[in-house]
Structures are given as structure tokens and as C-alpha cells.
Amino acid sequence: MEVDLSNQESIVEAIAKTVAKFGKIDVLVNNAGYGIGGAVEELNQKEISDSFNINIMAVIKTMKSVMPYFRQQKSGNIINVSSIAGFAPGIGWAIYAATKYAVTGLSEVMAEDVRGFGVKVTVVAPGAFRTNFLEDSSLVFADKKI
């Protein structure tokens, strides 16, 4: 099933289809995202907005969309993938780090907010390990170079 993470209706529809097919939903994993490199002054507003829209706003949209089901079930698990950059950022990755700081902070507060509904929230902040993350398909660099 494809989901357009920039489109709230697409997210709501995907979750509803999942519940219709399986009778419930147990886990939401927010693993979509990409790195964006460049100093803040190198990045244009679209590059910054696109990064925040996928790396943090999509996390918010999916959590908002799944919570009615989790509250009704009185159970569920949300797993948000952040990054080591969310607490130990690297030079030239300020915007990426900002999105991952946001995912980490959001997840920690969300865990407290939904605990009473039987929902658990976990944030995972991996460091460097062998994935496709450092390949061109997962990275964007500023068009403007200084």
C-alpha cells in the first residue's frame, strides 16, 4: 500500500484500510525520512520546508491519524525513528538535526500523553550502521554552495 506522507487524507485512508483488512492496528512505525546537508544559509526555504514536512510533520500526521484507533483498542505501539543527530548533530547538518531533535522531543512527550490510553511510544535514535541512508536516494544537499 502506498501512502503519501505529505497528504493527511492519504494517511487516514491507509490506516483505515489497514484496520479494515486486519481488524485492528497494533504498531505504527515512523521510519520515513531523509538527510539534508548544508549550512543553514545554504539551504533555501523549500529545501528546509520539505525536510520538516517529511521528517517531522509526517510523524505528527501519522500519530494523529492512528490515535483514535489506539484509544478505542486501549493499546498500541508507536515507534518513531529519530537519529543520533537528534542529540549529537554534525557540522553541516543543522536542519536535519533540528528535525531529529523534534522527533525525539515529540516522542518523549507523546509517550507521557498517551500512556493512560494503553499506548506506548518509543523513539529510536540510531547512529551510523550499514543501511542505504548514505546513498543518493536518501540524501539531499543544498543547491546553493558557499
Image (tube, rainbow, N blue to C red):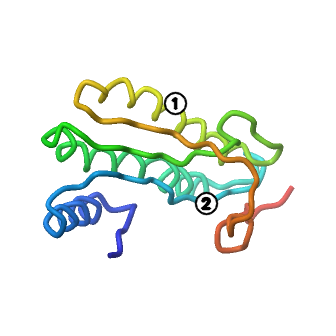
Q: Which of 5 and 45 is in front in this view?
A: 5
Residue at figure coordinates x 66%, y 57% from the top left: 35
Q: Nearer the viewer, residue 86 or 24?
A: 24
Identify the residue position indicated by label 2 in the image: 34
Dot 2 alpha-carbon crowd within 10 angstroms: few under 14, some 14 to 19, many 20 or more: some
Residue 143 drawn above or below residue 117: below
Amino acid bearing label 1: Gly
Residue 131 drawn above or below residue 72: below
What is the x, y in percent for residue 5? 39, 62
The answer for how far apart the CA atoms under marks 1 and 2 are is 18 Å
What is the x, y in percent for residue 15? 24, 60
Residue 145 is drawn in which quadrant? bottom right
Q: Nearer the viewer, residue 10 or 113?
A: 113
Q: Say whether residue 135 is left or right of residue 68.
A: right
Residue at figure coordinates x 13%, y 41% from the top left: 72
Earlier sequence position, callout 1 versus callout 2 = 2
**Which of the numbered marks, if any, corresponds to residue 105?**
1
Q: What element carries label 2?
A: loop
Q: Is mark 1 on a helix, strand or loop?
A: helix
Q: Say whether residue 39 is left or right of residue 50.
A: right
**Which of the numbered marks, if any, corresponds to residue 91?**
none
Quadrant of the frame with the N terminus: bottom left
Would you say residue 97 is visible in this rendering? yes
What is the x, y in percent for residue 79? 44, 46
